[in-house]
Image (tube, rainbow, N blue to C red):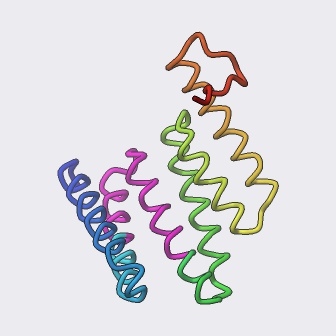
Amino acid sequence: MTADSHSHHLATGNQFVADAQKIATTDFAAARALWQQAGQAFYRAHQADRNQPEAALRLAQAWMAEAHALHKEGSPNATVMWQNAAAQSELAFDLDPRNARIAMAAASCHHYAGDAEAAEAWMQIGQHLASEANQAQDPDRQPGDEPSAI
């Protein structure tokens, strides 16, 4: 597949997510169907370019949405979906190992999957990377500095 098909599938998935978010509070079943279609589009985007971290992350996020829906229904399969989303988040992180957002997604997935140790480790990685990013944006900032309140 080409980069064009990657971009097309990513855009299609993003549109499904936007449509789902519009109706999620009024028709959860329909929103869930749209999220599943988004997941399929993100899967195709990830298959089109397996080195593209955003497609890998968006697929993880689609699985997170499905895990949340299964949890909401009380399904015992929710934990398995959280574990799958965690693994996919880790794959996305492998493609972009400086991305705090991806590390925090992995932490969240591990938390909901019931793996507190992995969740804590990923949270520490995410916080460290976020701190580094903040330091790079503001070189005068010292670790632990908090923005001042007005």
User: Is 101 placed left or right of 115 in the picture?
Assistant: left
Tag count in the figure? 0
Position of residue 37 relative to residue 118, above or below, is below
Magenta stretch: helix, strand or loop mostly: helix
Q: Quadrant of residue 147?
A: top right
> Camera-side residue: 48 or 37?
37
The outermost residue toward the top is 140
Viewport quadrant of the C terminus? top right
Q: Is residue 55 magenta?
A: yes
Question: Could you tell me residue 59's position as x and y percent?
Answer: 43, 62
Position of residue 36 relative to residue 107, above or below, is below
The outermost residue toward the front is 150
Which residue does the image show at 60% across and 25% down from the upper left? Answer: 132
Question: Could you tell me residue 27's position as x and y percent?
Answer: 38, 87
User: Is 34 placed left or right of 65 in the picture?
Assistant: left
Question: Could you tell me residue 108's position as x and y percent?
Answer: 64, 58
Position of residue 134 relative to residue 100, above or below, is above
> Camera-side residue: 139 or 87?
139
Which residue does the image show at 39% across and 48% down from the upper left? Answer: 54
Q: Quadrant of residue 56?
A: bottom left
Viewport quadrant of the N terminus? bottom left
Instruction: Please give the range of residues in magenta.
Output: 39-67
Question: Could you tell me residue 122's position as x and y percent?
Answer: 69, 47
Q: Is residue 45 magenta?
A: yes
The outermost residue toward the right is 117
